[in-house]
Amino acid sequence: SQTIHQWPATLVQPVGSPLSLECTVEGTSNPNLYWYRQAAGRGLQLLFYSVGIGQISSEVPQNLSASRPQDRQFILSSKKLLLSDSGFYLCAWRIHKNTEAFFGQGTRLTVV
Amino acid sequence: QKEVEQNSGPLSVPEGAIASLNCTYSDRVSQSFFWYRQYSGKSPELIMSIYSNGDKEDGRFTAQLNKASQYVSLLIRDSQPSDSATYLCAVTSYGNNRLAFGKGNQVVVIP
């Protein structure tokens, strides 16, 4: 069966510090991978998605970036965090563009 | 117009009643449609997927899709307190891999 791992679960970072969130999927090959952010009381904002190694589509121009160095690994990064980067970050995968997506446990990021 | 729109405010329903949630989408050629449930502080979990016009039932949940009118709805029958959560509508457009979500609707089931 397929599983998705996302860590850490919670993170408190100072303004201006770097960020690296990692997501890995097991039990499947060539998944579509997604990063979302959910601000408090808000919906899911699509940040990045990837259909293959090295292929990244960016939805929102900001100080975040994403990389996919391996087939089942998706990384969200920032060089300098802003207060507005606080939120609940969710990684998701699906096997095909028309199938359902499955989410990791999420990372709650607080920038102080 | 937002890509995926869920306009209703919080919905309070008595236990045992039917909760009805609606979602509209802007891309006429959207192909796949999903409903997710999200408990406070948790990640979303899939409830239903629907791909063709009409109704799809799974237990107490029924999804309805009308592509001509560009809306998808979710009915929760015999609502239980455990159904209290935020329900998110998600849509995939034709020709790309984007999966866009609405802002969600909070449902509160009153015992």
Image: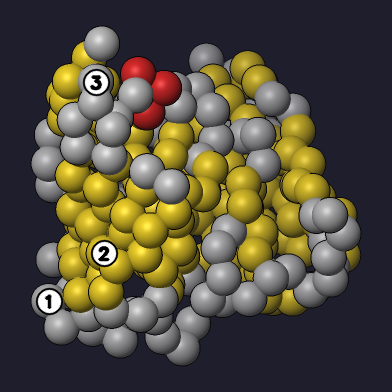
Q: Nearer the viewer, mark 2 or mark 1?
A: 2
Residue located at (37% from left, 28% from top):
B83
The chain letter for the residue carrying disc 1 is B
**Distance of mark 3 from mark 1, alpha carbons?**
31 Å
Residue located at (12% from left, 76% from top):
B69
**2 and 1 marks on the same chain:** yes
Sooner in the amino-acid sequence: mark 2 or mark 1: 2
Residue type (three-letter) at the residue carrying disc 3: Glu
Mark drawn on residue B64: 2
Element class at badge 1: loop
Q: How many marks?
A: 3
Q: Are marks 3 and 1 in contact (CB under 8 Å)?
A: no
Q: Which residue is mark 3?
A: B15
Mark 1, other Cα within 10 Å: few <14 / some 14–19 / many ≥20? few
Task: Tell me where residue B11 appears, x and y as whole percent.
Answer: 16, 30
Sooner in the amino-acid sequence: mark 2 or mark 3: 3
Q: In this orientation, which residue lies closer to the viewer: A58 or A44?
A: A44
The chain letter for the residue carrying disc 2 is B
**3 and 1 marks on the same chain:** yes
Asked if residue A4 lies left or right of residue A85, the reply is right
Q: Which residue is mark 1?
A: B69
Asked if residue B28 lies left or right of residue B50, the reply is left
